[in-house]
């Protein structure tokens, strides 16, 4: 029985290391998403300007109305809330993993929340570079979820 307890502790230490490593990777991806946030707005506005070049005058579009539409488009692509929640969920997961209580069900819940936020960023993404970061982040969350299944 002592050997079983010893092996369980060894496995727990290894699992904790893996989980914290995955959370670190996810945090890096979240930081990458954050760095793209301001660039995305500029890219979207530039795309809209190019599409409307020359068309504005031909169609008699009001420049002020075009600016309002551009602002709405940029607002729909805003991922600040999702990134904030992702950061908070990552902090909570780290705290749970670093604790000594039984946290399997709580971590499983946070896996769902992490995936929900990453998916929302992906659905708002209109830039291929950001979408690639989201795909990488989803893969990390899935690996994290698989490991969480081994936690009591």
Image: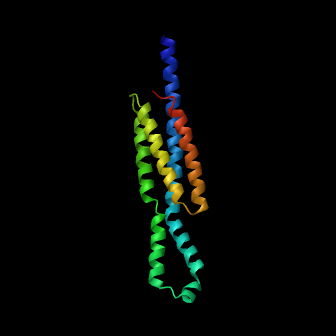
From the viewer's side, name the closer residue of 144 and 71.
71
| Picture residue at 45% right of the left edge, 71% below the top | 72
Outermost residue to the front: 59
- Viewer-nearest residue: 78 or 72: 72
Q: Position of residue 96 (x, y in %)?
A: 41, 36
Which of the pair 1/138 is nearer the observer? Answer: 138
In this picture, is 19 found above or below 25? above
Of 110 and 97, nearer the camera is 110
User: Picture coordinates of residue 59 (x, y %)?
Assistant: 55, 86
Residue found at x 40% / y 48%:
88
Residue at the top extreme, as displayed: 1
Tell me if residue 107 can be seen: yes
Is residue 30 visible in this depiction of the protein?
no
Q: Taking 45 as reference, is 120 above or below it?
A: above
Q: For residue 89, which quarter of the picture?
A: top left
Residue, x 59% and y 86% (percent of image)? 54
Residue found 40% across the figure and 28% down from its top: 102
Q: Where residue 94 appears, x then y in whole percent? A: 43, 39
In what quadrant of the picture does the C terminus appear?
Answer: top left
């Amino acid at each position: 029985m002592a050997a079983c307890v010893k092996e369980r502790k060894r496995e727990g230490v290894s699992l904790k290391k893996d989980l914290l490593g995955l959370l670190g990777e996810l945090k890096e991806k979240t930081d990458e998403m954050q760095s793209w946030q301001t660039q995305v707005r500029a890219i979207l506005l530039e795309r809209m300007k190019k599409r409307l070049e020359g068309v504005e005058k031909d169609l008699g579009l009001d420049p002020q109305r075009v600016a309002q539409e551009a602002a709405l488009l940029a607002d729909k692509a805003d991922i600040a809330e999702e990134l904030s929640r992702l950061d908070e969920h990552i902090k909570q997961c780290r705290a749970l993993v670093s604790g000594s209580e039984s946290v399997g069900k709580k971590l499983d819940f946070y896996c769902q929340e992490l995936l929900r936020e990453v998916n929302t960023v992906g659905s708002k993404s209109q830039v291929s570079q950001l979408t690639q970061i989201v795909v990488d982040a989803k893969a990390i969350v899935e690996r994290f979820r698989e490991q969480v299944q081994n936690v009591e």
